[in-house]
Image: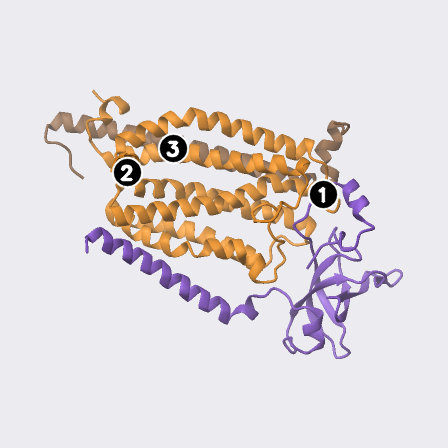
């Protein structure tokens, strides 16, 4: 690639549009990843609490 | 009929019903859903009177005129059948050039000139490196955005 | 009936929980490889476009986002229909898991399209058929998620939201064919058509790689969200006990 780093970053004058597109993708995908992993972690914690409360009152938790 | 078969038919029925309704609606409003009129429709008078609308077509080569010292430009838009003269004072998009597809929003003045308040550039779905475009240039219809 | 066992096994929450976990590392690996090559190829290797110069490079993030916005919606609708017809809880879990991911890709398609439209077309937004139908898709996703949230009872939420998802699927062909059926500002399809793609290999391969990478990324995110949904739906099923670390 004969393009210099400065040329690459400048994107022929379209840098604000090109880089904010890719930047937005990064932000949204990181949020997606955090959201998915957070949902899994929260679901596991909820299930653990359900098992613990079921064990403590021995009644089998409903709803 | 099993309950599962009933549910299958119900879901299928909903889909067919909604699809039919949507098809009918889109055909009924086909004209309203069009984004722009072409120059032939404009010269034939098939455009809204006294109301703003959009004209789309190719900028005729050699038709672009700019008054010295003024922002205002005039150019001819064609669908290769009829022409419409467009007058516009404002910033033109980067892709604007002669031979390019453009879409102008504005009104017809009494003399038949289209006075635009916005000019957008339309490009086609073809992408290629500059060298390829250069070598294609002598072939007809190889350059410029379609409408 | 042996040919249907794979389908029946997909109705088993522990089985789906297990296979979604087994797929996950592979999906993550190939997501990184394909998106990595797609973005590197698109931003560095591909030549600039003869008309749009470097601004055309937005296509490598815009087109795959738009593709996923539609694929994710079809996933939601098909899973919801399977859930309704076969009373399959796992299918409803798939629908519920795919919707927020699809909404995020729809948002990205609209945002990156806006960032591409401003320098090339000359406007951030316009009400042409393609842009409008894609915006309606975002509202369908948001409506679906809001409808789910409005019910306390999960079974009722599954049923009501499934009907909305199935009705809304008619918007998908409208988005795809909007640029064919009506004249619009948005151009036609470059890749997603029966004819040859309208770009040379140097530009095309990174785009195909990016499209595949985004699809795998969606699958990976779906696996994680699906596992969370299954845990919530399985309540206190005994197979969950070791998974969530309960005594």
Kindly indicate whether the residue at mark 1 contacts the one at mark 3 (C-beta within 8 angstroms).
Answer: no
Q: Which residue is mark 2?
A: C4
- Mark 2 secondary-structure assignment: helix
Q: Is residue C10 left or right of residue C125?
A: left
Neighbourhood count class around disc 1 (C-alpha, 10 Å): few under 14, some 14–19, many 20 upward: many
Q: Colour of chain B?
A: purple
Q: Earlier along the polypeptide chain: callout 3 or callout 2?
A: 2
- The structure's colour scheme is by chain
Mark identifier at residue C223: 3
Residue lying at 37% horizontally and 25% vertically, measured from the top left: C22
CA–CA distance in space, label 3 to label 2: 22 Å
State if disc 1 and disc 2 touch (CB < 8 Å): no
Identify which residue, C202 or C99, lies in the foreground.
C202
- Category of crowding for the residue at label 2, using alpha-carbon neighbours closer than 10 angstroms: few (below 14), some (14–19), many (at least 20): few
Q: Which residue is mark 1?
A: B128
Chain that is coloured orange in the picture: C
Q: Are marks 3 and 1 on the same chain?
A: no
Q: Name the secondary structure under disc 3.
A: helix
> What is the x, y in percent for residue B115?
74, 70
> Foreground: B15 or B120?
B15
Q: Is residue C132 left or right of residue B13?
A: right
């Amino acid at each position: 690639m004969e393009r210099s780093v400065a040329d690459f970053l400048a994107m022929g004058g379209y840098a604000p549009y090109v880089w904010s597109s890719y930047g937005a993708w990064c932000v949204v995908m990181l949020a997606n990843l955090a959201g998915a992993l957070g949902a899994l972690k929260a679901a596991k914690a909820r299930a653990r609490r359900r098992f613990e409360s079921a064990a403590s009152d021995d009644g089998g938790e409903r709803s | 009929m099993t309950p599962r078969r009933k549910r299958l038919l119900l879901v299928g029925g909903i889909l067919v019903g909604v699809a039919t309704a949507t098809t009918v609606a889109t055909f009924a409003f086909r004209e309203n859903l069009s984004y722009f009129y072409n120059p032939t429709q404009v010269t034939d008078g098939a455009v809204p009177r006294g109301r703003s609308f959009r004209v789309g077509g190719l900028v005729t080569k050699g038709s672009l005129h700019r008054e010295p010292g003024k922002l205002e430009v005039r150019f001819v838009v064609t669908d290769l059948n009829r022409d419409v003269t467009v007058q516009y004072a404002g910033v033109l998009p980067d892709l604007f050039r002669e031979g390019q597809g453009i879409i102008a929003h504005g009104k017809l003045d009494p003399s038949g000139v289209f006075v635009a308040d916005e000019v957008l550039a339309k490009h086609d779905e073809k992408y290629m490196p500059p060298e390829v475009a250069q070598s294609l240039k002598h072939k007809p219809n190889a350059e410029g955005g379609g409408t | 009936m042996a040919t249907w066992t794979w389908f029946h096994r997909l109705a088993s929450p522990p089985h789906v929980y297990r296979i979604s976990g087994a797929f996950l590392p592979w999906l993550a690996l190939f997501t990184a490889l394909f998106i990595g090559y797609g973005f590197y190829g698109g931003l560095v290797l591909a030549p600039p476009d003869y008309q749009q110069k470097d601004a055309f490079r937005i296509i490598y993030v815009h087109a795959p986002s738009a593709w996923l916005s539609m694929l994710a919606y079809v996933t939601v609708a098909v899973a919801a229909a399977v859930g309704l017809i076969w009373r399959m809880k796992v299918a409803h879990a798939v629908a519920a898991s795919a919707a927020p991911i699809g909404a995020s890709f729809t948002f990205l398609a609209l945002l990156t399209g806006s960032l591409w439209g401003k320098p090339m077309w000359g406007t951030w937004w316009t009400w042409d058929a393609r842009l409008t139908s894609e915006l309606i898709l975002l509202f369908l996703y948001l409506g679906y998620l809001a409808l789910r949230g409005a019910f306390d009872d999960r079974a009722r939420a599954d049923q009501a939201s499934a009907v909305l998802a199935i009705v809304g699927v008619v918007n998908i062909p409208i988005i795809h064919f909007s640029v064919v059926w009506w004249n619009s500002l948005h151009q036609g399809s470059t890749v997603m058509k029966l004819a040859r793609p309208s770009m040379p290999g140097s530009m095309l391969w990174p785009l195909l790689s990016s499209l595949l990478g985004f699809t795998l990324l969606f699958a990976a995110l779906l696996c994680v969200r699906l596992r969370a949904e299954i845990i919530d739906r399985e309540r206190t099923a005994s197979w969950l006990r070791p998974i969530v670390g309960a005594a």
